[in-house]
Image (tube, rainbow, N blue to C red):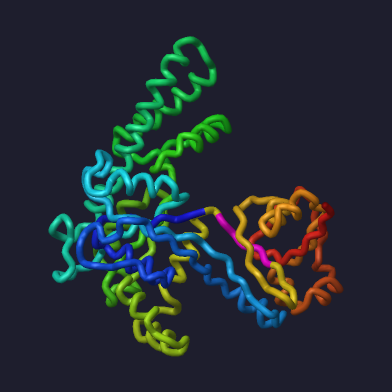
Amino acid sequence: MKAGIVGLPNVGKSTLFNCLSNAKAQSANFPFCTIEPNIGVVNVPDPRLQKLEELVNPERVQPATVDIVDIAGLVKGASKGEGLGNQFLGNIRECNAIIHVLRCFDNDNIVHVDGNVNPIRDKETIDIELQLKDLETVEKRLEKVNRAAKTGNKEAQTEKGLLDRIREALLQAKSARTVTPANADEEALMEDFQLITTKPVLYVCNVDEGSAVSGNAYVEKVREMVKDEKAEVIVLAVGTEADITELESYEERQMFLEDVGLEEPGASVLIRAAYKLLNQQTYFTAGVKEVRAWTINIGDSAPKAAGVIHTDFEKGFIRAEVIAYDDYVTYKTEAKAKEAGKLRVEGKEYIVKDGDVMHFRFNV
C-alpha cells in the first residue's frame, strides 16, 4: 500500500518526502526536479511500541511502516501529456492514496509556476487534470459497454448506469469519489475502474514557521474549500520540519519543537494520517526476541492478520490468543494478564482491533 505525494512544482513535495523518509530526494528551485518517483519506506511513529519495549525488554523492536512516493510536479495540461503528465498520471494510478501538498506561504525567493501564491487555484489545477484523465477513462469504457447494454445484458446495464453517474460528476468538475456506489456490485465495479479521483486524499498545507501551530489565511481558505470532501487537512511547516530532521539528538529536536510551539514533529502527525488514509491499522507481537508492529487493513480477520507474518500461519490457522493493548499495559506481563482473565482465545471469525497484542496457533 502506497501513498503518493502530489502537487504543483515547487510547493515543497520533495522537501517533505526527505523529512518523512530521510531518503535525500533531489530538491531544487525549478519545476520537474523530481522525474522518477522516489519511494521511501517510512516508520509509523507509535508510542505504544515504546511502551511495550519498556515492559518486555526485547532484543529488537520493529515498527510498522508505510510506503510514501514522491511524484513529479504536475502542471496544467498534464491530462494531455503536458510537462511530465503521462508519467505523473501513471505513477499516481499505482498509489492507493494521495497526499496533496498545497503551498500556503509567501516567499519571493521560491518561484511559483503560476506567478503568485493561491492554494485554491493550485488545488483546482490538479483536481481538473485528474478529473479529465478519469473522464477519458470513463468515456472509453462507456464506448465498449453501451453496445452490450443495448442488447439487454444486465451486468452491462449496471456498469453503464454507474459510469453515466461518474461521467456526470466529472463533467461538473467533481471527483469520482463523490459518487456513492448503490450496492456491492457497484462497489466492485468502482474498484475495477481504478479511477484516480476515487483515491482517498489528505491535504497538507505547507506554511511558514510562524504559522506552524495555528495556520494562516491561506489554510482557512483550503479548509473552507474541502469541507464537503470528508478529507483531513494537516498544517505543516515543511522547511521547519527539514531543519528538525537535520538535528542529531532527540534532546535538540525537542528543544527546537518547544521553541516553535509544537508537541511533536508535524511529519509524525502526517505519517500516522497517511497510515489511516490507507485504511491500515496495527497489531503487535511481543516476546523477548522481538516486539513488533504488524500492518493490516482495518476489518481484517485473525487468519488474515496471521498471514501477514507468514502465509502458513493463515493456511493452518487454529486460534489467536489476544490481549488488548490497554490490558497488557495495566498488567505489565502476558502471564499476569492471563491470570486476570484478560487473555482471550479467538477463532477464524475474530476481527482484529487496533492495538491487539496477539499470538497465533497454527498447524500446517
Residue 54 is left or right of residue 258, and the answer is: right
Q: Is residue 191 magenta?
A: no
Residue at 62%, 56% in the rendered image: 296
User: Where is residue 57 drawn, in percent x and y?
Assistant: 70, 82
Residue 206 shown left or right of residue 19 in the figure: left
Q: Quadrant of residue 169?
A: top left
Segment tinted magenta in the rendering: 280-284
Residue drawn at the location 35% of the way across and 67% of the way down:
25
Please tell me whether residue 307 is drawn above or below residue 109 in the rendered image. above
Residue that extends furthest to the right in the rendered view of this protein: 339
Residue extending farthest front? 36
On screen, residue 222 versus residue 277, left or right, reads left
Q: Position of residue 271 (x, y in %)?
A: 47, 65
Query: In front: 67, or 342?
Result: 67
Using the image, determine if residue 33 lies above or below residue 148: below
Q: How many labels sit on residues?
A: 0
Percent position of residue 252, x then y: 42, 89
In the image, is residue 151 above or below residue 124? Answer: above
Secondary structure that dominates the magenta span: strand
Identity of the residue drawn at 75% across and 79% down: 332
Compare residues 327 and 152 and report the one nearer the observer: 152
Please identify the quarter of the rendering in which residue 249 is found: bottom left
**Residue 283: within the magenta?**
yes
Residue 34 is drawn in which quadrant?
bottom left
* Residue 30 x, y percent position in the rendering: 20, 62
Instruction: Name the residue rendered at 45%, 77% in the picture.
Output: 264
Q: Which residue occupies the foreground of this view, 284 or 173?
A: 284
